[in-house]
Amino acid sequence: MAKRAPRNGTQPRTETVVALYPQAEWSPVDEENRDQSYVRKVRPRSDNQQRLLDAFQRHNLTLALGPAGTGKTYLAIASAVEAFEEGRVSRIVLSRPAVEAGESLGFLPGDMQEKLAPYLRPLYDALSDRLGGKRLRQMLGDGSIEIAPIAFMRGRTLNNAFVVIDEAQNCTYGQIKMLLTRLGWHSTMVLTGDPDQTDLLPGLSGLADIARRLEALPDIAVVQLDEHDIVRHPLVAGMLSVL
């Protein structure tokens, strides 16, 4: 069946189909399209951010709670890299719940690191800003940076490590309790999350309850950030105040 010619007399266009992701393999440390450059020294932009950085230095366990855009994850990653470079820890351990935000992606192909890469992309972005892509790939390769799924953390003791548990609001009470008891000698652990932004069913998130219980212990820091600490677009703080 012949193609119908356009009414204006021009020849029909032959469209070229291009792949959405032309690369053979997607790499979580690919920083070609990153919109931020390497920053040598991270400076806090608010009093609460300064309190958070001080807590990382003074406490082996810190819970950083606050809305999106307050720098919780970025400051935790920056402190982890700083501790590693100064020789205070021998590795960085990253973990994040593999919980989708309202939609199911189904089964993802690849090995464990490739399956977790989409969920851990915010951590990779922060690490890439601190280390650069080449060094990040090297540290992932030699095990200096370890990706540890929450499901595989049970039974481990994390000694001489800086551990970052991101998006902890998507962990149950039992999962957070298990994660906290992985803390070993000469290690620092940071849990970040927003109790008001959980993707779990109502009543399942354990972050707020855990934070309330641990706040009474003098050797544990619970730092609460708010909309005044948001460092993203100013509209973010305005939207969060009414949503």
Image: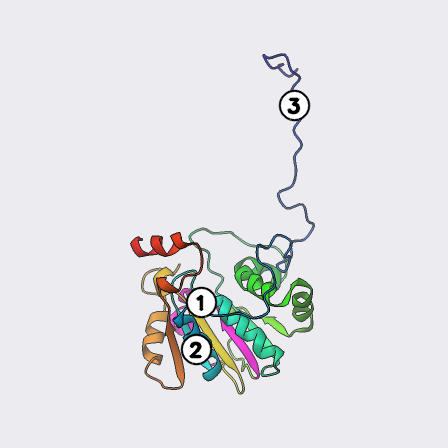
Q: Quadrant of residue 85?
A: bottom right
Q: Is residue 64 above or below residue 13?
A: below
Q: Position of residue 104 (x, y in %)?
A: 47, 52
The residue that label 1 is drawn on is 45
Q: Quadrant of the N terminus?
A: top right
**Residue type, label 1:** Arg
Q: Is residue 24 above or below residue 76?
A: above
Distance between the Cα atoms at labels 3 and 2?
60 Å
The residue sitting at 50% across, 80% down in the picture is: 188
**Residue depth check, mark 1 versus mark 3: number of the one nearer the observer:** 1
**Residue type, label 2:** Thr
The residue sitting at 52% across, 80% down in the picture is: 155
Q: Residue 62 got which mark?
A: 2
**Residue type, label 3:** Arg
Question: What secondary structure is marked by label 3?
Answer: loop
The residue that label 3 is drawn on is 13
Distance between the Cα atoms at labels 2 and 1?
19 Å
Question: What secondary structure is marked by label 2?
Answer: strand
Looking at the rendered structure, the number of numbered marks drawn on it comes to 3
Alpha-carbon neighbours of circle 2 within 10 Å: few (<14), some, or many (≥20)? many
Query: Range of the magenta residues?
Result: 160-181
Badge 2 or badge 1: first in the primary sequence: 1
Distance between the Cα atoms at labels 1 and 3?
53 Å
The residue sitting at 39% across, 65% down in the picture is: 229
